[in-house]
Image (cartoon, grey):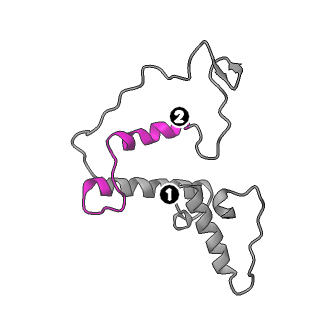
């Protein structure tokens, strides 16, 4: 099965300059920082690997669509891309594609995991023990 797209529907321009690339540096809480500050908050977001950006760029610009919409080309293409990614991740960790679940982020992932374990052990265990360093969604 193959799909053909006739034309692109989106374009993007690269930014002229980023505000945090000031060669003079910045002052943060009274401390002068030369060049770009070191980013340490990797919980919510991480830098994108250039290989990932290259692989995803067509989907950001012209091959976008809802993979759950099966009534049009955009949905078919997106579903095929998601299933290809699922198979690639499965191969990487020696799993079945049926075992790979994509979620929207940490909160959903933690909820699926914790609730799944709780349901599995519901007849045997009645307590969940965790630490103060867990993600906020686990502690709440």
Q: Quadrant of residue 62?
A: top left
Which type of secondary structure does the marked residue at label 2 adopt? helix
Where is 87 relative to 27, above or below? Answer: below
Which type of secondary structure does the marked residue at label 1 adopt? helix
In this rendering, position of residue 138 left or right of residue 50? right
Residue 23 drawn in magenta: no
Q: Residue 53's x, y, as percent?
A: 48, 37
The residue lying toward the viewer, choosing from 106 and 50, is: 106
The circle drawn on residue 86 is 1
Where is 30 relative to 64, above or below? Answer: above
The circle drawn on residue 50 is 2
The residue most toward the left is 6
Please rate how many residues cluster around mark 1, counting C-alpha atoms within 10 Å: few if below 14, some from 14 to 19, many from 20. some
Q: Quadrant of residue 139?
A: bottom right
Seen at 74% across and 73% down, the residue is: 128
Residue 60 drawn in magenta: yes
Seen at 51% across and 22% down, the residue is: 19
The residue lying toward the viewer, choosing from 39 and 94, is: 39
In this rendering, position of residue 127 left or right of residue 39? right
In this rendering, position of residue 24 left or right of residue 11? right
Q: Is residue 70 visible in the rendered structure shown here?
A: yes
Sequence order check, earlier mark of 2 and 1: 2
């Amino acid at each position: 099965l193959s799909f053909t797209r006739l034309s692109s529907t989106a374009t993007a321009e690269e930014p002229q300059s980023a505000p945090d690339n000031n060669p003079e540096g910045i002052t943060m809480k009274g401390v002068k920082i030369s060049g770009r500050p070191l980013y340490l908050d990797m919980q919510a977001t991480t830098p994108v690997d250039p290989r990932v950006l290259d692989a995803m760029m067509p989907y950001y610009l012209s091959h976008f669509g809802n993979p759950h919409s099966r009534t049009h080309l955009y949905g078919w293409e997106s579903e095929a891309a998601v299933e290809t990614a699922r198979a690639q991740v499965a191969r990487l960790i020696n799993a079945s594609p049926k075992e790979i679940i994509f979620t929207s982020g940490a909160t959903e992932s933690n909820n699926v995991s914790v609730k799944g374990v709780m349901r599995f052990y519901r007849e045997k265990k009645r307590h969940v023990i965790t630490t103060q360093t867990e993600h906020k969604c686990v502690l709440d």
